[in-house]
Image: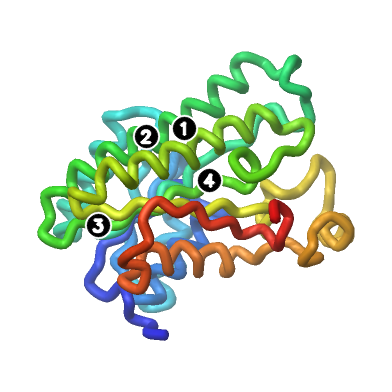
């Protein structure tokens, strides 16, 4: 496989200050992309950009709140002004709220935050990204980060989060059909538990999570962030040129 699949391409990754977003940004940087990393907090974004540059890549960071349309439009403009185009966007920014609570007890504020960021944030990002990509001769590719919780499986206590991610899965499929004629390919990945802090139960250590996953996951472990990043890069790459509207589950068989 080429390690330069994205040479000369500009890639935007939201929620790139840590976890999956950082791993995805680093993976694109390692394959030659000029990576714009975005999120709400400057410090972690600067760290991600520095890590990309330390491995020989090119990066810029922009603070933005994806739930604000003006922020997202400015983010896309900055990427284009800095690097000349927007070839790939990964809408990874997301939050988990109300975990462990049955849906009848989830606070309205938690529900609103989940949908503002996980759903409206993806919508606003898609709108700004498509608006730019449809003007480019080569179009572009967008990958939304959903979850195996929602459209693929349910577990008690995370129904609000699952509902928001089910919306992302549905939004992805519909947007893919709406905009493939514009030259914009849109797909999603739906990770299960991965090696990030979001998959840790309250007070749980990584060792305790590993023991739990040996019991709960058919694969017997969490997915690595590199495994999820590899799937994102495939969907964004020329090798996936005829992949439109797919929702790729990466969860060790948990939703099979």
Q: CA distance from mark 1 to mark 4?
A: 10 Å
Task: Give the residue number, with chain letter if any, for mark 4.
Answer: 146
Judge whether residue 255 can be spotted in this image.
Answer: yes
Q: Mark on residue 140?
A: 3
- In three-dimensional space, the C-alpha distance between marks 4 and 2, rounded to whole angstroms, equals 13 Å
The N terminus is located in which quarter? bottom left
Check residue 119 in the rendering and tell me which mark sits there, or answer none.
1
- In 3D space, how far apart are the residues under numbered discs 3 and 2 (Cα atoms)? 16 Å
Q: Earlier in the sequence, mark 1 or mark 4?
A: 1
Q: Residues within 10 Å of mark 1 (few under 14, many from 20)?
A: many
Where in the figure is residue 18, as x and y percent of width and height?
55, 53
Please state which of residues 129 and 243 is positioned toward the viewer in this rendering. 243
N-terminal label among 4 and 3: 3
Q: Is 190 left or right of 178, judged from the image as shown?
A: right
Q: CA distance from mark 1 to mark 2?
A: 6 Å
Across and down, in percent, residue 15 comes to 47, 47
User: Foreground residue, 18 or 235?
Assistant: 235
Q: In the structure shown, which secondary structural element does the residue marked by tag 4 occupy? A: loop
| Quadrant the C terminus occupies | bottom right
Q: State which tag comes first along the sequence, 3 or 2.
A: 2
Checking the image for residue 138, the label placed there is: none
């Amino acid at each position: 496989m080429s390690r330069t699949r994205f040479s000369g391409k500009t890639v935007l990754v939201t929620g790139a200050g840590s976890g999956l977003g950082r791993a995805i940004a680093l993976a694109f940087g390692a394959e030659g992309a000029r990576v714009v990393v975005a999120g709400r907090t400057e410090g972690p974004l600067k760290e991600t950009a520095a890590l990309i540059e330390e491995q020989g890549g090119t990066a810029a960071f922009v603070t933005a709140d994806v739930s604000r349309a003006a922020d997202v439009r400015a983010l896309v403009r900055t990427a284009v002004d800095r690097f000349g185009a927007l070839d790939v966007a990964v809408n990874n920014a997301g939050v988990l709220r109300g975990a462990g609570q049955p849906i009848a007890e989830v606070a309205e504020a938690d529900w609103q935050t989940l949908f503002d960021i996980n759903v409206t944030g993806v919508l606003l990002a898609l709108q700004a990204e498509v608006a730019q990509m449809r003007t480019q001769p080569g179009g572009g590719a967008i990958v939304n980060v959903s979850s195996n919780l929602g459209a693929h499986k349910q577990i008690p206590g995370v129904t609000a989060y699952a509902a928001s991610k089910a919306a992302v899965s549905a939004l992805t499929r519909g947007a893919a059909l709406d905009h493939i004629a514009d030259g914009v390919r849109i797909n999603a990945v739906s990770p299960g538990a991965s090696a990030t802090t979001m998959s840790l139960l309250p007070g749980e250590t990584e060792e305790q999570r590993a023991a739990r996953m040996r019991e709960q996951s058919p694969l017997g472990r969490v997915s690595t962030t590199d495994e999820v990043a590899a799937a994102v890069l495939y969907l964004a790459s020329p090798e996936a040129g005829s992949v439109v509207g797919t929702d790729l589950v990466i969860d060790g068989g948990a939703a099979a």
